Image: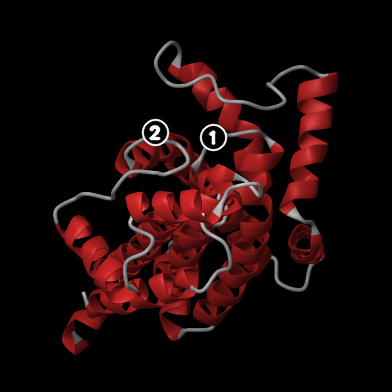
């Protein structure tokens, strides 16, 4: 809770010092001082910062995010509508990241200093170096424009055909997952290599377990704590950092909402969405801490 309060103070303070306001954007450069002052009073922009902050906090405590000045719509409704794009996109990207990274990381560690290990390391370095927006454009050119397997952009919604909604998110999810999978694969490889040197691995092999059983049943579980830490950070990053990909594929998500709100100086939208992102990061970190104990029971003694 204290972390959220501190985050809210920083968010409000940073956004409050930004030049310009929504009244100037709405009325334009030709607006008179009287009309500008009247609109600012109507929107509550003429109140002291402390009073506006207290009003914002009271609203959040009652689940009221206020009304967007530029969209003339409740912020909560805008967030719910856009989250139906961003959250599934982040989940799909994280699922692809986890699948690719775990397979490649374990494979590279089990083939340490051999051709397979070298190939994974080179591929992961290329993945880290590729900007996800450039990869998104490339994927769109190949799979949407040339092969026409997917749409080049836009989002049809979930109401008529959920499958069409999933297909619209495949290419952006792959573009987001490529970089994250490259990073996570290297972390997984390093963690698995450390565990492979432990005595219990030799004991398990001596008991007759196959190499695959040892790798996936014992080694990966013990190596998963540092991997899970990075996964938590990556999922939070996918939730909060989709603005570029959403613009590349014309997806109406939270990132695009924040970008448009900043352009329109609609700070009430920006404040609430950024606050939502901050809360999501805190919740994700808490879930990761709980999963530590589930994955490694030895940590319960130190809890």
State the image coordinates of residue 301 (x, y, percent, origin top left). 17, 86
In this picture, is 6 found above or below 273? below
Q: Is residue 271 visible?
A: yes
Q: Provide the residue designation for mark 2.
A: 81
Q: Which of 246 and 31 is in front in this view?
A: 31
Q: How crowded is mark 2: few (under 14 residues within 10 Å), some or many (20 or more)?
A: some
In this picture, is 293 found above or below 67? below
Give the number of marks: 2
What is the secondary structure assignment of the residue under circle 1? loop
Q: Nearer the viewer, residue 90 or 55?
A: 55
What is the secondary structure assignment of the residue under circle 2? helix
Residue extending farthest to the top is 160
Q: In which quarter of the image is residue 125?
A: bottom right
Give the mark nearest the N terminus, 1 or 2: 2
State the image coordinates of residue 207 (x, y, percent, origin top left). 39, 69
Which numbered disc covers residue 295? none
State the image coordinates of residue 267 (x, y, percent, origin top left). 45, 57
Residue name at image x 64 percent, y 68 percent: 109
State the image coordinates of residue 76 (x, y, percent, origin top left). 30, 42
Residue name at image x 29 percent, y 69 percent: 53
Residue name at image x 25 percent, y 66 percent: 294
Q: Provide the residue designation for mark 1.
A: 252
Residue name at image x 45 percent, y 70 percent: 16
**Contact flag, marks 1 and 2 (Cβ < 8 Å):** yes
């Amino acid at each position: 809770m204290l972390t959220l309060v501190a985050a809210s103070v920083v968010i409000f303070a940073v956004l409050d010092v930004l030049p310009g306001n929504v009244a100037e954007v709405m009325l334009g450069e030709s607006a008179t001082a009287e009309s500008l002052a009247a609109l600012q009073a109507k929107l509550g922009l003429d109140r002291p910062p402390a009073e506006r902050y207290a009003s914002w906090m009271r609203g959040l405590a009652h689940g009221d995010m206020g009304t967007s000045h530029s969209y003339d719509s409740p912020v909560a409704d805008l967030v719910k509508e856009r989250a139906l794009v961003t959250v599934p996109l982040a989940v799909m990207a994280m699922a692809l990241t986890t699948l690719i990274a775990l397979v490649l990381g374990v494979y590279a560690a089990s083939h340490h200093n051999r051709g397979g290990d070298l190939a994974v390391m080179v591929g992961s370095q290329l993945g880290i170096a590729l900007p996800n927006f450039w990869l998104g454009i490339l994927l769109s050119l190949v799979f949407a424009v040339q092969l026409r397997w997917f749409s080049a952009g836009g989002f049809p919604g979930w109401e008529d055909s959920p499958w069409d909604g999933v297909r619209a998110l495949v290419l952006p999810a792959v573009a987001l997952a490529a970089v994250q999978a490259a990073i996570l694969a290297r972390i997984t490889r390093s963690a698995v290599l450390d565990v492979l040197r432990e005595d219990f691995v030799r004991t398990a092999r001596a008991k007759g377990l196959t190499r695959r059983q040892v790798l996936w049943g014992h080694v990966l579980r013990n190596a998963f704590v540092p991997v899970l830490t990075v996964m938590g950070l990556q999922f939070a990053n996918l939730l909060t950092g989709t603005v570029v990909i959403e613009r590349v594929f014309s997806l109406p998500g939270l990132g695009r909402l924040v970008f448009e709100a900043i352009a329109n100086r609609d700070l009430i939208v920006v404040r609430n969405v950024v606050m939502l992102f901050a809360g999501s990061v805190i919740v994700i970190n808490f879930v990761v801490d709980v999963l530590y104990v589930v994955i490694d029971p030895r940590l319960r003694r130190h809890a």
